Amino acid sequence: MLSNRLLLHVIVVVYILSTSLSALGADWPQWGGRNNRNMVSAEKGLPDSFEADKDKAVAGTARNVKWLARLGAYAYGNPTVADGRVFVGTNAQTLSSDPRYDYTRGGLIKCFKEDSGELLWQFGMPERHDLPPGIHFGLQHLGICSSPTVDSDRVYIVGSNAEVLCLDVRGQTNGNDGPFKDEGTYMAGPGKPLIEINEKDGDIIWRFDLIEELGVYPHDAASCSILIVGDMLYLSTSNGVDEPHDKVLAPLAPSLVVLDKRTGELLATDNEKIGTRLWHAQWASPSCGEVGGRMLIFLGGGDGICYAFEALVSAGDEPTHLQKAWSYDCNPPKFRFLDGKEIPYYRGDKRKGSSPNKNDGNYLGPSQIIATPVLYGDRIYIAIGQDPAHGRGKGLLHCIDATKTGDITKNGCIWTYDGLDRSMATAAVADGLVYLVDIGGRLHCLDADTGEQCWVYETNKETWGGPLLADGKLYFGNERNFYIMAAGREAKLISSMRMSAPVHSTAVAANGVVYIASNRYLWATALMK
């Protein structure tokens, strides 16, 4: 049997090789493309603009639009592309193409043929109502809010009902693979007539219920894109506060979970009791990378702290706890305290009549982390933020030395940048520059080594998704437009397209195509002859 040290070395080597191959490949199989979650693609020959006319796109005549596919009423996750298939999460509203789903208001994952946009299969899940008292899980109708993660012949998602699902990438086209066999009952939901399964439906391999198995009480919606390291899945739980936003109902429930990707068996959880410090919910997705010979898992906490955990080396006979490598508080004292007193988290919620927040980006108070930590070299880039419904407020982008250990709030800070609003977006880092969008709609370009501002581009509209850097261009959207800018130390707008629906996701690039998920449609844009 391999020693733990040797086994960890093997895992690190395999990870480096797989990451290198992924960087050379054309697919985008997970959130961020690779495990470090840096929103940068090596694709070339991508479009400088496209004709955002949905009627022409449906007819196949829109300039630089390869195909257009109808989604539900919402799409807050991001598409992923692997092995000739495009996967995207949405919701099941207005799904007129299949009347079997007409009654459901939950999540939906769709699988399209990459070259044509043909729908290969789809899988729906109804809203969940068997909830513990006091839980505020009322936004399930927003659908699947995470990116599907594809690994070989399996696709993994955190469903809108707080279940982790392992699905067959082929759906039911190759039969109903086990061990799970009751997809018709599952899709129908409790008390509903059985749905007759056909070849256009999805195929569950296994499922893991975060509520039933771990006592997690998600808030608003389940939102995490799964990370795969070896045979293990890492995901955050969306554990959060109750309906009045007064307290965390399950403060000791885990925030980070590790499952066996083959069986769904629980292997490990964190033991940091993040729930005792949660302000709103644990929504951030984890990232991963090798630093100083250690394979580390990075997580932005709902308590405003960025964590690094030692990757699990092997599965034991019983679930275990992850070992913390370091922690870094992303809220300095001026964000946490006013006149010597702790600032209440919801004091800056613009919806409260008594709030001093004027929604101009100047309000100063604590924030959690919703963005994904980006590993670039030995540094982590991460910003703080809040639910956009709370309004604008002062944000902070951190550059952290990931080689440290322990509480590295002081000795791990390389630089901070406070010239931005709160942000939920994940950064793109390349060629000595870091790009990040804030909720207020400004794209910031900074020197990655020093944090010095190079430029800021103002869109004046609320922006959720981050920028994709590909082919020397920056792609990003907001609630009104989609933008393409030149990458580099000077701001240069290449084109701006008025969209028919808001773009709350981050664009992805694969095989010469830029995919953009709006709240109604999936756009496949490319240089067309």
Image (cartoon, grey):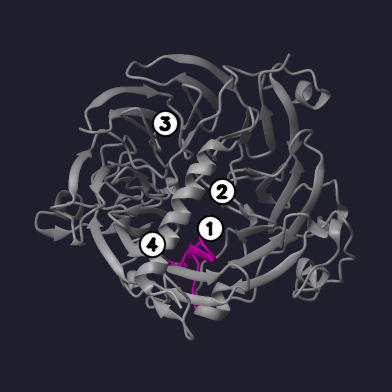
> Which mark, by number, is residue 9?
4
Q: Is residue 303 visible?
A: no
Label pair 4/2, CB-CB below 8 angstroms: no
For marks 1 and 2, the one nearer the N-term is: 2
> Which mark, by number, is residue 441?
3
Q: CA distance from mark 1 to mark 3?
A: 27 Å
The residue indicated by pointer 2 is: 30
The nearer-to-camera label among 2 and 3 is 2
Q: CA distance from mark 4 to mark 3?
A: 43 Å
Q: Nearer the viewer, residue 172 or 437?
A: 172
Outermost residue on the bottom side: it is: 317
Which residue is found at the position 81% from the left and 39% from the top?
A: 118
Label pair 1/3, CB-CB below 8 angstroms: no
Q: Is residue 227 magenta?
A: yes
Measuring from the top left, give residue 351's x and y in whole percent. 40, 49
Measuring from the top left, give residue 63's x and y in whole percent. 71, 16
Q: Which residues are magenta?
A: 215-243
The residue indicated by pointer 1 is: 226
